[in-house]
Amino acid sequence: MKIQVVGINHRDASLTLRERVALSPDQIVSAYAHRRQIRGLEGLVILSTCNRTEFYIAGDVSVEDVLAFWEALVAVPRTEFQHALFVALDLDAVRHLMRVAAGVESMVLGETEILGQVKEAYQVAQAAGAVGRLHRAFDYALRVGKRARHETEIGRNALSVGHAVIELANTVFGTLARRTALVIGAGDMGALVARHLRAQSLGQLYIANRTLARAQALAQELHAKSVSLAEVPSVMAQADVVVSCTSAPGVVVTREMVKRAIDGHAGEFRFFFDLAVPRDIDPAVRQLSPTIFLYDVDDVMRVVDANRAKRERAVAKVEQVIGEELAAFHEEMGASQVGPLIRRLRDKAEMIRQAELKKAFSRLPGLTDEEREVVAAATRLIMNKFLNDPMVAMRQWSADEDKQPYIEAVRELFRLGDDPRSASAE
Amino acid sequence: MGLWMMALASVGYGGAALFSVAQLYRPHIERWTFAWASLGWFGETLWLFHHGHAARFLVTRDGTVSMMVWLLVALFFLAQRSSLRTCGSFLLPVGFVLWAIDRVMAAALPPLMLFNGGWRAHVVWALVVAGVMSFVLAAVFAIMYLEKERELKQRRVRLFYYRLPALEALDRAMGRALTAGFGIMTGAGLVVLSGFLAHGEPWRVELLWALYALIAAVRYPGHWRGPRLASLTMVASLAVVAYVFGAPT
């Protein structure tokens, strides 16, 4: 069975191009409804995310037919995206699908969303009855995705500043649930970090900004409390995590301010993040207590870099998982392809046996039912014993690429013809 | 026979200590740590029965240390189901070092002289074992705390940043071990006092109790946490090890 993937992704196509040829959920449903326009199709799954649009296809389908189908769907001439096209066949196509599910092919290495997107694409195709002969390939790919996340560190540790702030705070506090955080600065970075913090089930989130209205707007969106910069010292006394990212030219959080805030609670853990350039928090804050941690933007980026290196090291392990699952898939597919041939060989032998038995019984009319049964059993036994060795050999050949001509030879030798099942499918 | 059991325990604990450290780098070899620790624990269990039967291990110092090591490894097994499971990478090497020193110095160790307090002697022995155990456990958490904190303070994340539990969890675990130890040693002190009142013969547990009292005082009224408490616990644990291996009793 032929499996192929035709598509474009972030490696070769610009965002503008990806946007133009991407398929919306409605377009995907429509594509499944009209899939019979593709000649020879035995299965179709379309994966369309912000980084890729890929057609996974089973059957003897030409790339030209797929492109014609695609350009009709998105109303973009193929000449505009053909240069960025990516095509892989058979095991390479399945390997690619596995790599996509594992996050190895993602723009952000090891990102976790892609596994859910692959699963959803598979489910939508299933609902439309379009998966056909791709079921096992997707089963294997989803298994690879799960194994990659459980058995390797491909999806662990933060790769963005926002996530890294949460990760670092968690290495001190364990969890941020019921903690108090203060974000000083309601600009882009402040809003980003505040959103990440809000997602941690914080006890209380305060947002301070020079322009109070801006802090209020963000606080309203995130169910937080807005405070003015003048209120920062009093709020800081309660805060376990303080993130400062203003565009102020000088220090916003001074040593004295922190000293007053922690007075009487110097033994409590506190994490300060200074994501501003120039810096907002006086570095001398670190000396106030051994339980105070202060990271500036370079420190946070160093953690992100270390995490990225860690994920890159995990790729080799993921490739190992892919290798194992691909070998199992190959074996299974080989066995399933040789199955119909074996069945036809048996059917043919059985047909001959029945025909010859019928002739023999007509020449021996005096046989009792018991004697007829003995003769029939003997012929069945001869047939089974004769076919056993070739069938075992054919199953073994199915897993070996070099032995494929032998299987074809069996087909020719016994005149078994084409697989009627594959011809009638889809 | 006893030698064979001791060798089994030594090999098992040695392997477990090595694998437990390697497991920090290769978490998937965790099962091997468990297997080696189980082998050592099995060997030591047999040895404790054999030794206890032959020499009444309760009254020997080396037997007492062995019992502590046995309990440490039992704690490692219990910790496998908790969020502090990585403590095994520190607990098992500490246990192995204690076991090795105990086996090498067994003959040279001064005898353990229990006071003639009947049941009280056994109770005090059990409480002191538990008290020392709590101290060793707190010291293990202190080492973990200091290592992780060191990486965070240097702002260059490496192994411990990824592998060890959160600082607050380690600080809390350290505090709980010390609090439990203080309670246990206070209980031991009271039993000793009652024995002294009944028989006029003391059994010295005041060093351990005083260390615990000092740490409890700095942690609670003094609000010490984090690195200061961890460092003090580490220093105090050295005194405890000295006490276990030969301080007058």
Image (spheres, coloured by chain):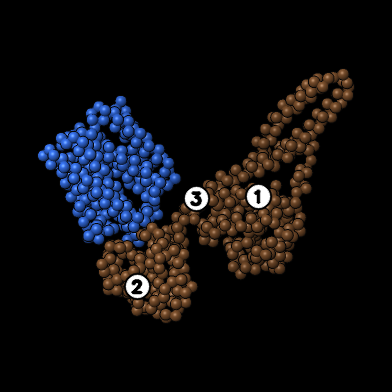
Chain colours: A brown, B blue
* Residue shown at 39% from the left, 73% from the top: A184
* Residue shown at 70% from the left, 47% from the top: A1
In this figure, which residue is indicated by the disc labeled 3?
A150
Tell me, yes or no, if residue B238 can be seen here: no
> What is the chain identity of the residue bearing mark 2?
A
Q: What is the x, y in percent for residue B150?
A: 31, 57
Q: As displayed, is residue B157 above or below residue A1?
A: below
In this figure, which residue is indicated by the disc labeled 1?
A135
The residue nearer to you, when weighing A402 against B13, is B13
> What is the chain identity of the residue bearing mark 3?
A
Rendered image quadrant of residue B119: top left
Looking at the rendered image, the disc whose residue lies closer to the viewer, 1 or 2, is: 2
**Residue sticking out furthest to the front:** B198
Q: As displayed, is residue B207 above or below residue A24?
A: above
Q: How crowded is mark 3: few (under 14 residues within 10 Å), some or many (20 or more)?
A: few
**Position of residue A20 in the picture relative to residue A317 (left or right):** right
- The disc, 1 or 2, on the residue closer to the chain's N-terminal end is 1
For the residues labelled 3 and 1, the Cα–Cα distance comes to: 23 Å
Q: Are marks 1 and 2 on the same chain?
A: yes
* Residue shown at 45% from the left, 60% from the top: A158
Q: What is the x, y in percent for residue A393?
A: 67, 33
Circle on res. A235: 2
Tell me, yes or no, if residue A198 can be seen here: yes
**Position of residue A144 in the picture relative to residue B247 (left or right):** right
Task: Give the SS element for disc 2.
Answer: helix
Q: What is the x, y in percent for residue B126?
A: 24, 39
